[in-house]
Image (cartoon, rainbow, N blue to C red):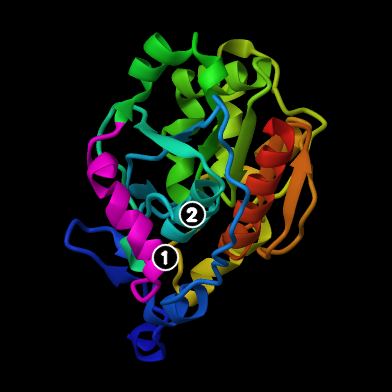
Amino acid sequence: MLKKLLGIAPQLEPDGSYRPSKRALKMATVDKTDFEPISYDKYAGNRSKILVIFSEQKNMAMRNGKLFSTGNHPVEALLPMLHLQNAGFEFEIATPTGKPVVFEMWAMPQNDEHVMGIYNAYKARFENPTPLQEFVDGSLGDAESYAAVFVPGGHGAMLGIPEDANVGKVLRWAHENELFTITLCHGPGSLLATTLNNQPFLYKGYKMAVFPDSVDKQTPMIGYLPGHMPWRLEEQLTQLGAIIVNKKSDDTTQVDRKLITGASPLAANELGKVAAQTLLQALN
């Protein structure tokens, strides 16, 4: 009751999961983002496609058994897509099984015309994405048409994707064909898929930005999460040999070889700019 009075009680959803508390939403979400509509010299070559791997799962079980209502963070997905689209790239939308993309709709910046514009433009494709197996079966021989693989953030990126063999295949394909891999916040959980079937971690020794475990440990206190995380992303990446460059959930971005990463939703705009500029410089 006290938590409700203070506005820090996670809010129950109809399916029994919890979205962040009213206080947490005020602190951690925005109605309008810091997106900058930059005019890039558009890419006009053959490698214009970017595969975007989204989560199709919604609920994350916390250590106390409560379910966090998650999915893909809309700002972390759509701001980078806006920059990359403005730079001349197009997207193939995929989920592990072809089920619809799940967004954290409670984090959608409803008053941001740019974000809502690209969301509505791709809404039909978000609802009917390519199954990742279909991409693996049909497109791995067509690396010359692709510039990058993008895995958006949101806690949903830690659900299923790190254990998906096709995610590991796609990331290795991108690495072997010198495509860029772009991800941010909890999206680097996808990188763990490269260790499946006893394979070595593809990004050992890479510098990367990721959402800090220390912040995930604190957020239950304001009701952002309804409990503590089931596992620690930063810890697992570090144990595998990744070098984490940020201590805070800030706007840090990092480029190391063909890996482009960002620390949090606050890095989404900067990550989009860095990714667009890096791809244009490499491909033009």
* Contact, mark 1 vs mark 2 (Cβ under 8 Å): yes
- Compared with 274, 138 (above or below) is above
Name which residue lies at 17% across and 62% down: 14
Number of numbered tags placed on the structure image: 2
Badge 2 crowding class, 10 Å Cα cut-off, few under 14, some 14 to 19, many 20 or more, is many
Q: Separation of disc 1 and disc 2 at Cα?
A: 8 Å
The answer to whether residue 104 shows anywhere in this view is no
- Compared with 47, 173 (above or below) is above
Q: Which residue is tagged 2?
A: 82
Name the mark on residue 114. Answer: 1
Q: Left or right: 194 with respect to 159?
A: right
Name which residue lies at 72% across and 64% down: 248
Residue 132 or residue 60, whichever sits in front: 132
Question: Residue 132 sits in which quadrant?
Answer: top left
For marks 1 and 2, the one nearer the N-term is 2
Q: Left or right: 156 with respect to 59?
A: right
Q: Residue 43: percent from the left, percent from the top? A: 59, 39
Single out the residue that lies furthest toward the bottom: 5
- Compared with 79, 159 (above or below) is above
Quadrant containing the C terminus in the rendered view: top right
Name which residue lies at 32% across and 62% down: 105
The secondary element bearing badge 1 is classed as: helix
- Please, what is the dominant secondary structure of the magenta stretch? helix
Start and end of the magenta stretch?
A: 107-129
Quadrant containing the N terminus in the rendered view: bottom left
* Amino acid carrying mark 1 in the image: His
Name the mark on residue 128. Answer: none
Question: Residue 56 sits in which quadrant?
Answer: top left
